Amino acid sequence: MGIFKRAVFAKYLVVAEEYPDFLYHVTYASRLDDIAKHGLTPNAPRSIGGMSYDSHSKGKVFLTEFSGVDYWMSKAEDFANHNSDHPLTDLYVPVVLQVYHDDLGDLLEDEIGSKDSTHKAWFVHKTIPASNLTVWSGKSWVDLDSELDFSQAFDIEEEEDGESLEFFKATSPFLPSHED
């Protein structure tokens, strides 16, 4: 193999290792309708993390490799529990979106997200169109406008006063079991 071919081959090996076929974005069920209409947009309100992330997240859409999804789902559940007494009712149900990396253009490494999650994380500065996204239904990757049963993520207990208590299951069915 010539020097040029080896250099090209090595470059594409690095790219293949650096960017998996699919990347993932964790968000909430309450945002799916808006994402289905407008795509994943930079400068959308932050859904995971505290105000300390605001300056870091400005103008970005964040993505992770498959192995990082579990970490971000856990953070999203923690944030949901902190911000809502009724996460199912308020649709603070973490869901995972999938996008093919070739549909993204220029990916930049998110050093803070990679460090926090201990998995590769990236961001883009442009909108990811809804047509390029699918959501994990609990069984398969489906279109964003598909009907999803968000109650499957919860154990629900009825109190004597008629109040319902909503507890996230130990493992969410909205945590994908496989990459594709």
Image (cartoon, rainbow, N blue to C red):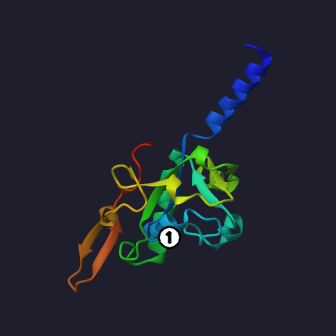
As drawn, is 76 to the left or to the right of 59?
left
Residue drawn 27% across the image and 82% down it:
163
Q: In which quarter of the image is residue 4?
A: top right
- Pinpoint residue 44: horizontal percent, then vertical percent: 60, 70
Q: In which quarter of the image is the N terminus?
A: top right
As drawn, is 110 to the left or to the right of 97?
right
> In the figure, 51 relative to 141: above or below?
below
Q: Quadrant of residue 53?
A: bottom right
- Residue 104 visible to an observer of this rendering: yes
As drawn, is 52 to the left or to the right of 134?
right
Residue kind at label 1, given as amino acid type: Asp
- Pinpoint residue 103: horizontal percent, then vertical percent: 59, 48
> In the figure, 84 relative to 6: above or below?
below
Residue drawn 62% across the image and 55% down it:
116
Residue of label 1: 34
> In the figure, 130 relative to 101: above or below?
below
- Pinpoint residue 15: horizontal percent, then vertical percent: 66, 36
Residue drawn 50% across the image and 56% down it:
131
Q: Residue furthest toward the left?
A: 160
Mark 1 crowdedness (10 Å alpha carbons): few <14, some 14-19, many ≥20: few
Q: In which quarter of the image is the C terminus?
A: top left
As drawn, is 171 to the left or to the right of 42?
left
Dot 1: what SS? Answer: helix
- Residue 119 visible to an observer of this rendering: no
Comparing 87 with 4, the one in front is 4
